[in-house]
Amino acid sequence: LRQYGGYTCGTTCVQMLMNWLLPYEADINLAAYEEALGTTEEAGTSPAQILEYFEMSDVNAIASDGWSADDLRVALDRGNPVLMCIQAWSASGDYNTTDPSKTETYLAEGHWVICVGYCQNAETPYFIFNDPACVGHTILYTDELNRRWIDMDGAGAIFDHFGIEITQNTQYSKNGLFYMD
């Protein structure tokens, strides 16, 4: 799914995950998810809002800071997608992830993505994402992901290598075939 505007990436990721978990029951429009999550143009969607929504919707998920690339691979090997907040889509390609004194640029490119795969055997290992800003998938090389895997919510809380692993079984059929009632 594609986000609209520059602030609905978190909402769109939740919509994608809910559609994957419950293809029929959770198939509601983005505006309904935006309202349910409390997403705003000024602050986007915080990790707390997403976790509250998942809890309210009985979605089994594990959230924590301090993930490593190896932790991410283990979750993906279990078949579990991981919702992540990172720095992405900077017009200049620069990401200020280390200098909070530069308030205009520090963690200013926050973006939600869903990690769905990886390639460890490539010359340069990378991770694969469902990215609501793109059609199709995006990739980040492991070293670049580690540099950009940090974000800040509207209240100033820092989320460093934060991930929400979706551990619930899905009703989605991998072969895409459903019986038409």
Image: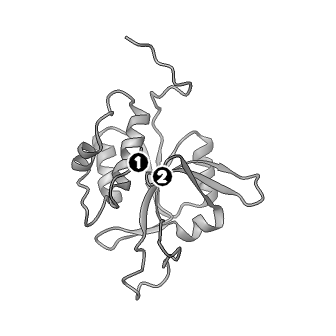
Label 1, secondary structure: give it. loop
Residue at point 42%, 62% (across, down): 111
- Asked which quadrant contains residue 146, the reply is bottom right
Residue at point 50%, 81% (across, down): 98
Display colour scheme? one colour
158 and 141: which is toward the camera: 141
Circle 2 packing at 10 Å, graded few (<14), some (14-19), many (20+), is few
Counting from the top left corner in percent of width and height, residue 135 is at 49, 48
Residue 83 in the image: above or below residue 167: below
- Asked which quadrant contains residue 127, the reply is bottom right
Residue at point 45%, 36% (across, down): 168
Label 2, secondary structure: give it. loop
| Residue positioned most to the bottom | 101
Q: How many marks?
A: 2
The residue wearing badge 1 is 2
The residue wearing badge 2 is 134
- Amino acid bearing label 2: Cys
User: Split into 4 quadrants, where in the image is the C terminus?
Assistant: top left
Tag 2 or tag 1, which sits nearer the N-term? 1
Instruction: Tell me whether circle 1 and circle 2 mark residues in contact (CB < 8 Å).
Output: yes
Circle 1 packing at 10 Å, graded few (<14), some (14-19), many (20+), is some
Counting from the top left corner in percent of width and height, residue 151 is at 43, 68
- Amino acid bearing label 1: Arg
151 and 131: which is toward the camera: 131
Counting from the top left corner in percent of width and height, residue 38 is at 23, 54
Residue 25 in the image: above or below residue 155: above
| Residue positioned most to the top | 181
Tell me the CA gap for discs 1 and 2.
Answer: 7 Å
Residue 114 numbered tag: none
Residue 169 in the image: above or below residue 86: above
Counting from the top left corner in percent of width and height, residue 86 is at 47, 64
User: Split into 4 quadrants, where in the image is the N terminus?
Assistant: top left
